[in-house]
Amino acid sequence: MQEHLDALEKHMQQLQQAMRQAQMQRRQDRLKELRAELRRAQRSYDALFDQDGDAQPDAEDPASRPSRPPATQMPAREQVHQVLTLLTVPAAPKLISSVHEALFTAPLPTTRMATLRRDEERSYRSAPGARPYYLCPALTSDHLSPARALLTISIWPLEDRIVGPLSARVHFLTSAVKLTEAIQRLTPDPQKMTLGARQLVRHYALNIPGALPADPQDRGAAPDLALLREAAQQELAVHTDDDTHERRGAAQRARHQLDEAGQLFGAPFQTTRRLRSVT
């Protein structure tokens, strides 16, 4: 969460500097565009900041805010938003469902997410900005088109909603780190970890070198979350810089080639070839 706030703050500072330069150059059209983008960034920042504050209850007055409804009573889009906010990276419906069930012990069938992307885009186009956030597809770094079966949140910085050649691995490792942190917060005693959480952690550990103990253990034993997190972080250090460079370059192209709706929901498929030809 904090990294998204930091990125938005930096983006708003860059916009303000660009506005001053445009004003000095008397470029009114450019100034108008920058001002509109700054307003959008501010709305995203406010929504994310409020959300971050809601996640940390006031210890002195725990009754000062209404309690969050149980997961089973929440709309599907809020459940998806909850998981994506925890993972901080684009995720497929299957992973979102698995993480939700592992952490919140409530099912979130992938069928409930089948029409979310289409519904969210329809809502945005009918009333842009009416909601504090939208669930959007990730965008491919080459064509800036919607990535298949990957969901993101609109208030994330654009580069965090783009996937490149290395992103799948980076996102897998990042989600492993975030998952272990969440499990440790929710279940301090590893022995009390739910079956769903154990299975998900084991899936990650089997696919990350060095995440399993050297000595074989009973399959029913509590997973070593610290070992998994350390192994994931070590591999992340290898891939993160290259992945970030690729995504930032694609985000720069997207800001020049796509309108606001396109930056959220991707370039129409019929225009991807044209966009590709001008890169």
Image: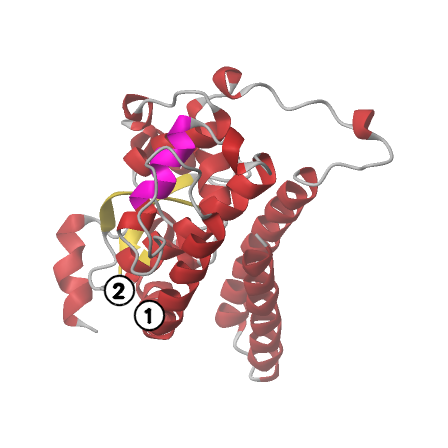
Q: What residue is shown with label 2?
A: 166
Chain part drawn in magenta: 195-203
Q: Residue at 60% of width from left, 56% of height from top? A: 2
Left or right of 273, for residue 171: right
Left or right of 62, for residue 182: left
Q: Decide which of 225, 254 is in the foreground and name it.
A: 225
Callout 2 crowding tier (Cα within 10 Å): few <14, some 14–19, many ≥20: some
Give how far across and how far down residue 126 sits, in percent. 41, 33
Residue projecting furthest to the top: 73
Q: Residue at 30% of width from left, 56% of height from top? A: 208
Q: What residue is shown with label 1?
A: 239
Magenta segment main secondary structure: helix
Residue 126 in the magenta stretch? The answer is no
Q: Residue at 25% of width from left, 52% of height from top? A: 267
Quarter of the image holding residue 240?
bottom left
The amino acid pointed to by label 2 is Leu
Give how far across and how far down residue 56 sits, in percent. 70, 41
The amino acid pointed to by label 1 is His
Marks 2/1 in contact by CB < 8 Å: the verdict is yes
Mark before the other along the chain sequence, 2 or 1: 2
